[in-house]
Each structure stands twice: as structure tokens, then as C-alpha cells.
Amino acid sequence: MEFFQIPLQDHQDSEPKFILFRPLLGIAFIGNQQMAEFARECLAENHLGGNKHGKDEISTFLETIGFLELDPPPPNTPNNGLFSPTHAVLLLTNRCQMRCIYCYASGGELPFEELSLATAKKAIDIVYDNALAQDQPTFSLSFHGGGEPIMAWDLIKACTAYAREKDLPVRTSLTSNGVWTDEQCKWIIKNIHGISLSMDGHPAVQNHNRPLANGAPSSPILEKTIHQLDLNQKDYGIRMTAIPPWSDLPKSVDYLLKNTHCKGIQVEPAFNTKRGEHKLPNKKEAQQFIDAFMQAYTIASQYGRNFRYSAARVTNPVRTFCTAPYNTLIVNPQDEVVACYEMTHPDHELAHLMRYGTIDSTGLKIDIEKRQALIDLLDHNHEKCRGCFCYWSCAGDCFARTIKKTVTYTYIKDYARCEINQILTKELLLRKIAEGDGVAHLYRQAKKV
């Protein structure tokens, strides 16, 4: 039974306290060293089928809140490593109307590329056939890319129309910068189920981080787009990228939640100083993001809306950080099947690792050994985190941030990024404990104590 004793910051004049955490059960509360030792002892006795403590007050409390229950089965690797995807992600184009100052893909700067309609149709055929064979009620189609998907406008419409000809319903989604014409906005509202808008905050931040290609501000266009989405009661989420100054993050979250009806915000920090790269944080940058995130989290809670960061999840245990490498058919404009949404160009440092197949109008070819080698590497890297209380939440973090190209490929244990994930997870556990009147039940309804 997995049990973690997570230290809280000690004050010299107070007794040390800990978060006592059962990650697979999703139960946490605060206790002192004596309580931690008692809980550990009770868990060991329960595992062996004994109970020398009988029904004293503390053991009764632990039993009542469910803390002494056996761990449920851990989550499985998606589809147990088999490759039969029912979700296609089409990386449509590298063109873009924006020049975001941190863009990992240098969107809009490279020679023009666009996915062919023939390849897109074949990808749709494959995921539809898999869904049919697996007796799934639907299949999924997402539009993404190293550029702005809407720049391949005719292709989006043709793919959506083709998918709708199938005998199963298709669920469509779009990740976009929101720079749409009135005609495009009307079509998206009518035809796309899930929308993720890339927007960084209040106008000054948005215009600085995400200018149009000609240098003009983008916030007026985004405000118009969001007004139409809200007017039509269309569900959408906002995906923020946060960069220094970190004090802008809480202000931007407040602005977005006050002025939009978005169902939630996901924020990811960027520490790179130029387009076309990623950079890992130093300790100071990590702490600044942590402080800003928690301020923004408090603001979002006051609005009653979801605010999250991908590597600090406490709502359910996960085996993998991302399902993309496991059971998603991701296709880029080079007719390659890749393991990551960021694999949009062959110059990517991890391109050889991320590419494990090809697809065109004639069909799909998967290098099974290469794909399995990637999955084995991800599993191996995750196991290095086994002693961490974030094992079932961070799940090894994003492999595009934690694997470095060497003679082979090496897992980079970046302590500043780990610190972000661990401290934020701990802070979120504390919030959930407070919300649960002293006991957090993260994955199910709280028991009455």
C-alpha cells in the first residue's frame, strides 16, 4: 500500500507536520510525526491481516476516512501498449498569422507545409475503423499544429465533412489562436465540439506575447472571437503560456475569468528567451512561477472555475503524463506518424525518437520496434520517479521536456522543474485538505468522520 509522509515547512518553535497521503486512494490529511508512524504501522498491520491497536480513537479515525483501505488497482498504460487509436490529431500546417515570442515551433517562419487531404482522409479512415472494431460509440478528430490550423481552412472543412460521412459520430476539437474571420467563427461554433483557445491574458500581456505577424496587437481580435463564443454559449477552454514578469499571471487570470465565460484555464510556463526552443528553469524562476500560480489558483477558486498546470494534477491518478505517445494517431505535414504534438519539423532535437511511422493515401506503416523502444524509455524514466509522491500525478512529466538527445537519449532529472511539480502538488493537496475540513478525498465523495 503506497503511503507518503510529505514534510511541511517547519518553524523552529513548532512541532514538525506532514501531509499523510495515500495517492492511489486519493486521501490526505495533516498529522505530526507520531500520527505518521501510527498510520504507517496500521497500514503494515492491515496488509498482514493483524490489528494490535484494536479500536482506539486514532485507528477508528483512520478506518472511518478510508485511509486503511487496500490500494485499488493502479491505472494501466493506455491500451496496454497496443496501437489501435480511435483519436486522430492532424498537425495541419506550419503557417501562422501570429509571431508569439516563445513559439517552440517558430510558427510562420519556415517554408510553407500543409498536410495533404489524401493523408488526412486515410488517418480518419484508420481511427474510424478502429473505433468500429472496438465497438466504440464515437471516434475523435483534432486539428492542431506547429502553426495555426485555421490557416488550412479548406482542409479543416473537408476533413470534418469527410469524417461526418462515417457511420459513427465524430467528436471534433480544435486548438487555435482565435484569429478568425466572422465566417470562420460561425462555422467553428456550429461544427467543432471542443475548442482550446491560446490566449495569455489581459491586453498588454496578450499583445506583447502574441503579436500578429505584422506586429499589430492581437487582443482586439481575440476579444471579438470570445464575445461570439460567449454569445452563442459555446464551451471552450483557454490555454495560457506564462512568462516573466510572473506578477502578470494572477492579473491575467483575473482578467480572463472576469471577461470571459471560459470553462477553465490551463497554464504552462515557458522559460525560453527566443522562438524555436525550450529552456529549463533555474531555481529562482521555478519559485517565481510557483508563487504566481498559487495566487492565480486562489483567484480562479473565487470565480468557481478550474485552473490547472499539467504536471500537478490531484484529481485522479495517472500512469502517463500524456496519452499522445501511446494511442493517438498524430500525423504531421511530412506524412509522418509521431508521438508528440510538438513534432512538427524534422529539425526537432527529439525528431528521430518521436517518429515511428508513416502514413499516406495508401495506408499506415508503423515501426513496431521503434515505437516499443520509445514506450520502454518512457516507462523506464517514469520508474526513476517511483519514490516521489508525484509519481501518480506528474507521471514523469512531459517527455519533450525531460529527455535530452545524447548518443542515445537520456532522461534529464531537472530539479527546478521537479520542484515546481512537487511544491505545486503539495500546495494543491493542502487546499483540498482545507476544503475537506481536514481530510481530502480527491477521487470520490468524502466519508463522514
Image: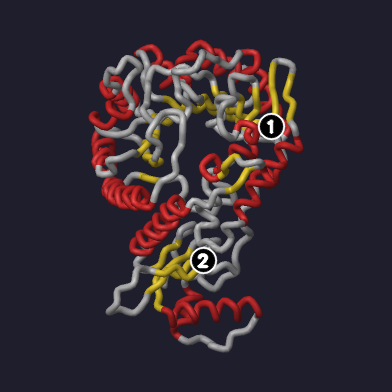
Q: Position of residue 231 (x, y in %)?
A: 30, 25
Locate residue 24: give its quadrant: bottom right
**For the residues bearing labels 2 and 1, Cβ distance under 8 angstroms:** no
State the scheme by which the image is colored: secondary structure
Say if 299 sits above or below 332 in the image: below
Separation of disc 2 and disc 1 at Cα?
37 Å
Residue depicted at x 33% and y 72%: 10
Vertical placement of 8 versus 167: above or below?
below
Q: Which mark is residue 22?
A: 2
Q: In the displayed structure, would residue 439 be above or below residue 295? A: below
Q: Which residue is mark 1?
A: 356
Q: Quadrant of the C terminus?
A: bottom left
Q: Nearer the viewer, mark 2 or mark 1?
A: 1
Q: Identify the residue at image location x=54%, y=88%.
A: 54
Secondary structure beneath label 1: strand
Q: Nearer the viewer, residue 61 or 44?
A: 44
